[in-house]
Image: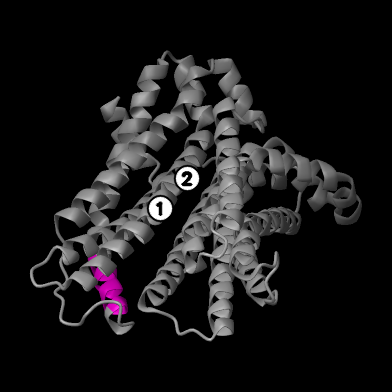
């Protein structure tokens, strides 16, 4: 199966591109923050600067690690699901589930190794940039020598490889255990059902977020910016919980909007409703980065705005620790924006590449390229609206408790401009990428696309 895996990689390089890009950026991000640990352990680093470097590496890098694992798992699961028909055919010609699983794991290991090596140079440049940011913002003393050594390489390569293999094992377990006939049927019709483990994980993260929200509004009330320790995590866990519940959210919303969309949108809306109903499980991978981006960005930005307003109202001057926290928050947002954008673009491009032959068959039976494009637009609008609304709900789990803890009021006296900006960014990323990928797809002649 090792030889088969290598041949599969060679002939399906485009199919693994999204996974490779996610791993490269994920590994680069983890290495960049881990390099701050190498820098902190250098000779002559003052204790205050060492504390700031370690805090930045562990806190922000820790959340980045969670995002990397989640992104790699999501992207790889999408790729494996898209190969359901291929694996079903392998079963029909005699391949065992264990052999197919080993093939996917070997493919993933090779991609992870290549991605980790490709990430070293950009990670070193990003790590140096992070140190410069900390120096320029007076969080770290000047003159500290940047180091990129065992912490960066060990943590970066180890996390990337471990996350990739774990994601591969998770992705193939359900696929290889089904029988060949069932695999072919699932590949043709899709599957919107959620596994018990996914349901349990979604409930766990939602309950965790809710419990932290209650803790923030009660136990952390009156403790100043220390409430960020619990409030900052809340929108992240709730966003992950809602993202895991994506298939159910998509199914329920599509069912509610089916008739109005079909009446108003004609053929494109009808095709979109039918596709979304059958492929809710796969489209959940596209919904995930929208929810994560909107929820975490909204929660963190408003939390920092509440803190700034509370500090100004009290007439106090922000301490060095509070400024460090502000730098951490905005660094998290910057990291989130970049990584979520990459995750979203990768997912959309991978999904549209997979649907190339499907859209070609639609054109062969009379659907015009314009109708195919409008179908993608309607689908993108549905996913964007569902994503930003779910993200807003996740953000409220941080905003409301933190506002109660810091001001005594459930809702802060802050406008909706920040949320609208986040929504606009999510819409541009989703619709822009989806339409761009669809345009490239319909430019290929239908007969040629079907044979690819």
Q: Position of residue 175 (x, y in %)?
A: 50, 25
Q: Residue 133 or 16: which is nearer the viewer?
A: 133
Residue that appears at 51% across and 61% down: 227
Q: Residue 131 or 16: which is nearer the viewer?
A: 131
Residue that sits furthest to the right in the current view:
263
Instruction: Judge whether 315 appears above or below 266 on screen.
Output: below
The residue under label 2 is 75
Dot 1, how many residues are within 10 Å of its Cα: few (below 14), some (14-19), or many (20+)?
Answer: many
Q: Element type at marker 1?
A: helix
Q: Quadrant of residue 424?
A: bottom right
The residue under label 1 is 22
Circle 1/circle 2 CB separation < 8 Å: yes
Q: Quadrant of residue 31?
A: bottom left
Judged by its main secondary structure, the magenta piece is helix
Residue that appears at 40% across and 30% down: 169
Instruction: Judge whether 177 appears above or below 447 on screen.
Output: above
Segment colored magenta: 124-134
Horizontal arrangement in the rendering, residue 267 relative to residue 143 (left or right) = right
Instruction: Judge whether 98 appears above or below 140 on screen.
Output: above
Q: Is residue 133 magenta?
A: yes
Q: Position of residue 225 (x, y in %)?
A: 48, 68
Residue that sits furthest to the top in the current view:
94
Instruction: Judge whether 224 appears above or below 263 on screen.
Output: below
Task: Kindly tell me whether residue 12 is visible in this rendering.
Answer: yes
Give the alpha-carbon distance from disc 1 to disc 2, as whole Å: 8 Å
Q: Residue 86 or 40: which is nearer the viewer?
A: 40
Q: Position of residue 268 (x, y in %)?
A: 79, 52
Q: Element type at marker 2?
A: helix
Q: Is residue 22 magenta?
A: no
Quarter the N terminus occupies:
top left
Dot 2, how many residues are within 10 Å of its Cα: few (below 14), some (14-19), or many (20+)?
Answer: many
């Amino acid at each position: 199966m090792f030889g088969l895996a290598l041949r599969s990689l060679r002939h399906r390089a485009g199919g693994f591109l999204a996974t490779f890009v996610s791993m490269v950026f994920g590994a680069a991000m983890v290495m960049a923050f881990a390099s701050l640990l190498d820098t902190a352990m250098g000779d002559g680093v003052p204790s205050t600067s060492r504390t700031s470097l370690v805090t930045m590496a562990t806190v922000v890098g820790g959340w980045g690690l969670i995002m990397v694992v989640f992104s790699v798992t999501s992207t790889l699961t999408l790729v494996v699901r898209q190969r359901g028909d291929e694996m079903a055919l392998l079963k029909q010609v005699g391949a065992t589930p264990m052999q197919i699983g080993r093939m996917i794991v070997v493919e993933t290991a090779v991609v992870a190794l290549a991605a980790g090596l490709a990430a070293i140079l950009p990670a070193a440049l990003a790590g140096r940039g992070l140190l410069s940011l900390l120096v320029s913002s007076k969080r770290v003393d000047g003159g500290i020598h940047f180091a990129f050594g065992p912490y960066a390489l060990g943590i970066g390569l180890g996390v990337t490889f471990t996350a990739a293999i774990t994601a591969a094992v998770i992705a193939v377990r359900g696929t290889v255990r089904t029988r060949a006939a069932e695999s072919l049927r699932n590949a043709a019709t899709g599957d919107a059902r959620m596994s018990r483990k996914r349901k349990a994980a979604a409930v766990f993260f939602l309950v965790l977020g809710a419990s932290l929200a209650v803790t923030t509004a009660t136990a952390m009330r009156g403790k100043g910016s220390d409430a960020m320790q619990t409030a900052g995590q809340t929108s992240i866990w709730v966003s992950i919980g809602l993202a895991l519940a994506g298939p159910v959210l998509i199914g329920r919303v599509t069912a509610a909007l089916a008739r109005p969309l079909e009446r108003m949108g004609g053929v494109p809306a009808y095709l979109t409703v039918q596709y979304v109903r059958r492929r809710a499980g796969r489209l959940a991978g596209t919904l995930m980065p929208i929810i994560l981006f909107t929820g975490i960005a909204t929660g963190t930005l408003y939390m920092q705005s509440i803190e700034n307003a509370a500090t100004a109202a009290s007439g106090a001057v922000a301490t060095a620790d509070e400024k460090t926290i502000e730098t951490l928050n905005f660094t998290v947002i910057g990291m989130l924006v970049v990584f979520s954008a990459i995750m979203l673009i990768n997912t959309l491009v991978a999904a549209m590449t997979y649907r190339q032959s499907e859209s070609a068959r639609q054109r062969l039976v009379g659907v015009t390229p314009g109708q195919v494009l409008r179908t993608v637009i309607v689908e993108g609008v549905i996913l964007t609206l569902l994503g930003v609304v779910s993200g807003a709900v996740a953000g409220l789990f941080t905003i409301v408790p933190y506002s109660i803890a810091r001001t005594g009021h459930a809702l802060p006296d802050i406008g909706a401009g920040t949320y609208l900006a986040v929504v606009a960014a999510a819409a541009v990323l989703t619709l822009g990428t989806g339409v761009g990928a669809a345009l490239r797809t319909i430019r290929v002649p239908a007969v040629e696309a079907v044979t690819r």
